[in-house]
Image: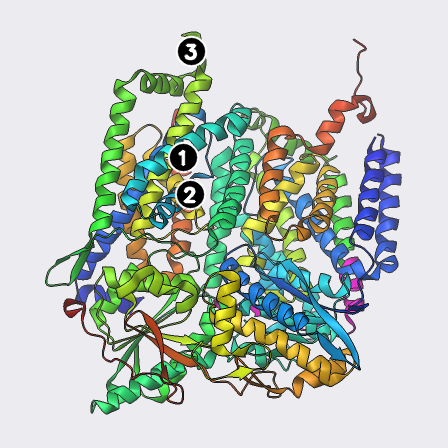
């Protein structure tokens, strides 16, 4: 009996080996396959979907425009997706699978710094170029990886501009920035912890005292403990970073508890849709963003940043959060690199990516030797009268920042 | 099936296991993980299957091993392999100590209280690790790169985990035949009677858990290097995935048997890799359905079902009716 | 940690604020815990899918706001829908595991919880969802202490539901049948009670309680497909402390847990709040066990 069972098992194993199929060639007929493991389930599922839609939209546009021309021949792009379930263990395993079993030679990044951190060592070891659009953690670029490229700005820039802005505003009022106090609440994950490091470094630079430095657990659904402290200590700046959940929770509970803070800065405002969800309570909030539809960048494929936003909304029925925009840009960089490399050799493509210098609807893209995009700054929005309005840096500022936030008694 | 046939079977499987990574080099990472799954199920079954103490917290030992070896590799400055083996050993030892302490606290609880307490321990361990700066807190740790070609790396891990699984299997095959194994089963069948007969049940349970902890700690130490990234909640103390899979694989194959967990792990891992990855977003729905299906319709597992179907093949005498 | 304590001494009103917040959230835990105590006591099943029922109740209330309906209506609507769902799940799945080993039912409901998490993710996406109740906040001590009205309504609702449940169990035929089955299912069956129906009703009522709690959760806090487990664990803890079949104690334990958790989050730092809950769970179980052990030794 046992023997028969074991035989059945072996048959299953055999089946598995063959069902997964012979390794697909990375370039088959006239299609170039890119691999991506993204979060379709689990805690990052919402942003994983934005990422996938960004990739899909760019692939569709490029293919409709005739595809990619490599060495005189036209190729179409296609993406092989897997679901990493928002867990790094699965992400690393799937990266492996994409490379070995599916024979993918070029990878698009997953969503979140944690997942990118899990997958980057795999792609690095196999020498597979990976262009990622959603792993902002600066620590990713301190390992000397040669095959990892990021089209987005890294974490230390996320909320640094808000600290600088607060210092500038204080000076304008005739206050010494070193008299300011700052409260921070950061999710306990690689992304937010890096943001925390950036904010603390900046606070130190201006001599700002950090009075609260809380770490939020990912399962958090109540920030009352932190906000009670904020109420008691009355800091000048409150910084919260905790993906979509942190942003929603902060806005809701600050209103509910009537926490008065002159300057509130968040990440992930637009993907959490704080204006749609909370209306007037979101006013005055500063939000760091990789991209905004009002910026003046443009390219031949999508047109201007605003055109991309219109196209995305037509296709998917909602305004694109920046996660979708940067994902689309990552595909554009691959297409551009293939054309310039003129071959499918992994290292030739890698060198071409490294030499990228292009303008896209998402911003300028140029990588430094660690693989970071150094040509595009972060922007800072403020919620003004129910709209996200760019207030910094001054080059794109559409309006002056409204400061300080009036106390709740007067709103 | 008699002892000799089992030995032949084990040797055949071992030969296939040794040849498989050489024949299918593209699947080495999968095969290495397969042996990890087998280790999960076998070690879980020592306490869960043999004594009936269903633990959701064995993943604690796995996570301890993973962190121990990551810390040794980061701080010792030793050569890759030396640090790895040292870390694995250290992980195993710490896991034993923790198992002894945890065992003295929770192993006196009965049934579901034990199950829930271990569930709590697993999650508490993840949260505490996520708050501890020394081991990277919420940001996790990255393990050093393997010195050499990735193909060689996976070959190494394939054989490492297979070797570990083989050692555990042989140890358990021997252990379950000794007085110790009988004592474990006596606890499962009726703990009060076992105690009344003078068995020190607490001691047996704790030692069983320590054996499981030791091998899980060692496994964890190496898995950190296989995955290359240690995250407190999602890889090290991954209760909702690894922690539950352990239980599920053992039950699927047939808990309380020697071969059941092995069989369950193979079937589970292969199903997962062949089917789920193509379900894109629906695989957890499938997992939920599978769990419900197994426990509702198949609670004895594949081996238990087979034993009922063909009892004579398992050495049970059946009267013709 | 030390500076957090010092802050409490400097601003004692903070303690008031934390206690109020903790007690209000604790009342919602208590509602889900009533249901768990019922199912555990009557059917001898630990229902791991508890938290997912809470989340589903929240999503139903959220869906109503999308259609322009006031989320307060979500409390009864979610309760009714969950009641029907609970009965369906009982006849489909729970009925087959109710008389088996408790671990089997534990695992079956765990499987259900994974299934429901994912289905909710497919239907509503994994965004954090909240519903605006339209109520505002009260202020005490010159804006120092805030009490959100919706949380107060939830608190009152929790007490009301508890009271109704006690009346229901004492006064109605079905309630009496449920209590009889809890005491001795076999005897109840001999006396002509259809225990299968009683089990179905009990499980349905449990789901309905969770649904109502969820509708309060989405108005006062937020819901998300994957954050059900903490509600399950808290229900479990409350029931372990309060004991089966003692509803007033469930309320007290719920409020106490909420307050303890919020205080711990403040003093230890929020990052240890979840760890605190789970360590407390283990500590309670160990304590309960040593007390039992002492009793046993005494009897020997």
Query: Do the residues at pointers 2 and 1 share their chain?
Result: yes
Find disc 3 in the rendering and name its residue.
C187
Give the residue drawn at x 75%, y 53%: B164
User: What separation in Å lies between label 2 and label 1 (alpha carbons)?
Assistant: 8 Å
Position of residue B62 measured from the top left corner of the image (x, y, whole percent): 60, 55
**Marks 2 and 3, the one that precedes in the sequence:** 2
B207 in relation to B228, above or below = above
Q: Relative to B320, is B267 on the left or the right? A: left
The image quarter containing residue C103 is top right
Position of residue C123 measured from the top left corner of the image (x, y, whole percent): 49, 48
C64 in relation to A187, above or below = above
**Marks 2 and 1, the one that precedes in the sequence:** 2
Q: Residue furthest left?
A: C142
Find disc 2 in the rendering and name its residue.
C56
B47 in relation to B68, above or below = above
Q: Is residue B149 visible?
A: yes
**Of A155 and B189, the residue lying toward us:** A155
Provide the secondary structure element on which disc 2 rests: helix
């Amino acid at each position: 009996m046992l023997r028969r069972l074991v035989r059945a098992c072996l048959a299953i194993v055999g089946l598995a080996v063959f069902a997964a199929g012979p390794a697909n060639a990375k370039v088959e007929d006239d299609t170039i396959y890119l691999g991506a493991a993204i979060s379709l389930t689990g805690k990052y599922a919402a942003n994983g979907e934005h990422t996938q839609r960004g990739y899909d939209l760019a692939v569709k546009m490029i293919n409709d425009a005739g595809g990619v021309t490599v060495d005189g021949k036209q190729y179409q792009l296609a993406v092989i997706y897997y679901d990493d379930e928002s867990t790094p263990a699965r992400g690393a395993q799937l990266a492996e699978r994409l490379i070995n079993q599916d024979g993918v030679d070029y990878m698009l990044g997953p969503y979140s710094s944690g997942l990118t951190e899990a997958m980057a060592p795999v792609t690095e070891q196999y020498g597979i170029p990976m262009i990622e659009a959603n792993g902002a953690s600066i620590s990713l670029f301190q390992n000397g990886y040669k095959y990892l490229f990021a089209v987005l700005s890294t974490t230390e820039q996320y909320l640094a501009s808000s600290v600088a802005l607060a210092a500038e505003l204080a000076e304008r009022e005739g206050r010494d920035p070193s008299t300011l106090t700052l409260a921070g609440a950061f999710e306990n994950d690689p992304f937010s912890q890096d943001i925390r490091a950036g904010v603390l470094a900046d606070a130190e630079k201006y001599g700002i005292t950090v009075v609260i430095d809380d770490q939020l657990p990912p399962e958090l659904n109540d920030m009352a403990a932190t906000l009670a402290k904020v109420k008691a200590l009355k800091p000048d700046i409150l910084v919260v970073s905790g993906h979509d959940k942190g942003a929603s929770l902060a806005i809701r509970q600050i209103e509910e508890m009537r926490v008065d803070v002159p300057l509130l800065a968040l990440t992930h405002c637009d993907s959490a849709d704080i204006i749609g969800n909370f209306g007037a309570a979101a006013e005055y909030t500063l939000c760091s963003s990789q991209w905004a539809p009002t910026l003046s960048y443009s390219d031949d494929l999508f047109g201007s940043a605003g055109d991309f936003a219109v196209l995305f909304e037509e296709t998917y029925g909602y305004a694109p959060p920046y996660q979708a925009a940067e994902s689309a840009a990552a595909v554009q960089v691959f297409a551009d690199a293939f054309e310039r490399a003129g071959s499918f050799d992994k290292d030739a493509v890698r060198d071409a990516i490294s030499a990228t210098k292009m303008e896209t609807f998402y911003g300028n893209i140029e990588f430094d030797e660690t693989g970071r995009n150094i040509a595009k700054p972060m922007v800072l929005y403020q919620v003004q009268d129910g709209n996200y309005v760019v207030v910094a840096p001054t080059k794109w500022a559409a309006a002056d920042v409204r400061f300080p936030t009036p106390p709740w008694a007067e709103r | 099936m008699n002892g000799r046939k089992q030995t032949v079977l084990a040797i055949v499987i071992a030969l296939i296991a040794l040849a498989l990574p050489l024949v299918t080099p593209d699947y080495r990472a999968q095969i290495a993980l397969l042996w990890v799954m087998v280790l999960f199920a076998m070690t879980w079954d020592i306490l869960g299957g043999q004594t009936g103490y269903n633990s959701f917290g064995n993943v604690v030992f796995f996570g301890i091993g993973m962190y121990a070896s990551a810390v040794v590799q980061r701080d010792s400055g030793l050569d890759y392999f030396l640090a790895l083996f040292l870390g694995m050993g250290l992980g195993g030892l710490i896991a034993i100590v923790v198992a002894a302490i945890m065992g003295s606290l929770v192993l006196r609880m009965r049934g579901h209280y034990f199950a829930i307490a271990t569930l709590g321990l697993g999650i508490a361990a993840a949260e505490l690790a996520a708050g501890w700066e020394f081991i990277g807190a919420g940001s996790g740790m990255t393990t050093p790169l393997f010195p050499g070609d990735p193909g060689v790396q996976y070959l190494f891990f394939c054989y490492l985990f297979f070797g570990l699984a083989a050692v555990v299997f042989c140890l358990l095959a021997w252990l379950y035949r000794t007085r110790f194994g009988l004592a474990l089963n006596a606890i499962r069948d009726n703990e009060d009677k076992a105690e009344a007969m003078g068995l020190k049940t607490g001691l047996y349970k704790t030692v069983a858990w320590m054996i499981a902890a030791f091998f899980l700690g060692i496994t964890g130490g190496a898995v950190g290097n296989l995955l290359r990234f240690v995250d407190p909640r999602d890889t090290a103390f991954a209760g909702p995935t690894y922690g539950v899979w352990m239980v599920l694989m053992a039950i699927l194959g047939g808990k309380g048997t020697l071969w059941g967990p092995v069989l369950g792990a193979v079937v589970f891992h292969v199903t997962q890799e062949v089917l789920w990855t193509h379900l894109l977003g629906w695989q957890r729905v499938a997992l939920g359905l599978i769990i419900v299906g197994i426990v509702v319709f198949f609670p004895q597992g594949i081996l238990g079902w087979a034993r009922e179907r063909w009892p004579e093949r398992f050495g049970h005498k059946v009267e013709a009716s | 940690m030390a500076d957090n304590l010092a802050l409490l001494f400097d601003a004692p009103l903070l303690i008031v604020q934390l206690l109020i917040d903790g007690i209000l959230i604790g009342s919602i835990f208590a509602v889900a815990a009533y249901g768990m105590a019922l199912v555990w006591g009557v059917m001898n099943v630990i229902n791991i899918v508890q938290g997912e029922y809470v989340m589903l109740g929240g999503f139903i209330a959220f869906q109503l706001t999308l259609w322009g309906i006031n989320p307060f209506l979500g409390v009864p609507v979610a309760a009714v829908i969950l009641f029907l769902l609970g009965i369906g799940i009982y006849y489909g799945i729970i009925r087959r595991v109710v008389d088996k080993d408790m671990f089997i039912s534990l695992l079956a409901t765990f499987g259900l919880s994974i299934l429901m998490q994912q289905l909710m993710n497919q239907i509503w996406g994994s965004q954090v969802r909240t519903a605006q109740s339209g109520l505002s906040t009260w202020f005490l001590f010159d804006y120092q202490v805030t009490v959100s009205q919706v949380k107060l309504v939830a608190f009152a609702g929790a007490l009301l539901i508890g009271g109704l449940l006690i009346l229901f169990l004492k006064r109605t035929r079905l309630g009496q049948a449920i209590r009889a089955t809890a005491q001795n299912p076999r005897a109840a069956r001999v006396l002509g009670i259809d225990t299968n129906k009683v089990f179905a009703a009990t499980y349905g009522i449990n789901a309905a309680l969770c649904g109502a709690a969820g509708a309060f959760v989405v108005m006062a806090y937020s819901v998300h497909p994957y954050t059900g487990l903490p509600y399950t664990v808290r229900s479990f803890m409350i029931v372990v402390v309060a004991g089966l079949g003692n509803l007033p104690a469930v309320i007290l334990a719920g409020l106490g847990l909420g307050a303890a958790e919020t205080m711990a989050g403040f003093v230890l730092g929020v990052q240890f709040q979840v760890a605190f809950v789970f360590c407390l769970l283990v500590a309670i179980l160990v304590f309960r066990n040593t007390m039992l052990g002492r009793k046993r030794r005494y009897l020997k």
